[in-house]
Image (cartoon, rainbow, N blue to C red):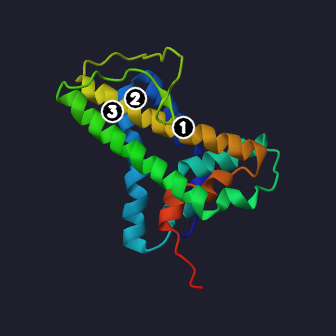
Amino acid sequence: MERNIKNELFFITIIFFVIGIINISFSILGLFCFIYPFILYFKYKDRIWCKYFCPRAGFLGKVINKVSFNLKPPKWLFSENVKEFAIYYFIINFIFVIFSTVMVALHRLYPMNYLRFFIIFKIPLQFPQILSINLPSYIIHFGYRIYSMMFTSIVIGSILGIIFKPRTWCGVCPIYTVTVKKKKR
């Protein structure tokens, strides 16, 4: 792991959001950013994903860096309470994603065909789908849910990065928090 290619991979974040406009089912590829960091962590016992590969960190460092006010973030932002909130939010959100997708597959819930910010706020925007693919409704639902999770985190990360230092999000990111080695006191 000689070279930090993270800053060169920022375009993956942009591509992810573009392919969701092409067809929302492609958003399922976002699972890679949820699963692969842990595979790397368990293999190397280090934050290899955060240090070298995270496309969101690359996006924040490369794109948001250009518009950032570069203010020092407040200490409370990196408190254990904020980090735990971020972890629990994403765990709960992912559980909602899985269970709601199963319920759609079982025809017990209508599929979601719109974006949400956080878990509950419907984004009042007709989401274009350039390529029409005939897929089961649960795949489309799952795509919207994954896209919504990624959209929420990139918006929060971008706002934090514009106001404070560009990669402020990285300090509260659930992947970082779970994979960082705790310092012995």
Residue 124 position (above or below residue 16):
above
Q: Please indicate whether residue 60 sits to the left or right of residue 86 in the image.
A: right
Number of dots carrying numbers: 3
Packing grade of label 2 (10 A; few <14, some 14-19, many >=20) is many
Give the amino acid at mark 1: Thr
* Point 43% across, 74% down: residue: 45
Residue 127 position (above or below residue 174):
above
Q: Which mark is residue 19?
A: none
Which image quarter holds the C terminus? bottom right
What SS does tag 3 mark? Answer: helix
Q: Which mark is residue 144?
A: 2
- Where does label 1 land, which residue? 152
Can residue 63 be seen here? The reply is no
Q: Quadrant of residue 69?
A: top right
Q: Residue 42's spot in the image, x, y percent?
A: 37, 70
What SS does tag 2 mark? Answer: helix
Give the amino acid at mark 3: Phe
CA gap, disc 3 to disc 1?
A: 15 Å
* Point 54% across, 48% down: residue: 55
Give the amino acid at mark 2: Tyr
Viewer-nearest residue: 69 or 49 = 69
Please report contact status of discs 3 and 1: CB closer than 8 Å, yes or no. no
What SS does tag 1 mark? Answer: helix
Q: Residue 167's spot in the image, x, y percent?
A: 67, 53
Viewer-nearest residue: 43 or 87 = 87
Packing grade of label 3 (10 A; few <14, some 14-19, many >=20) is many
- Where does label 3 land, which residue? 142
Q: Quadrant of residue 93?
A: top left
Can residue 77 be seen here? The reply is yes
* Point 53% across, 61% down: residue: 176
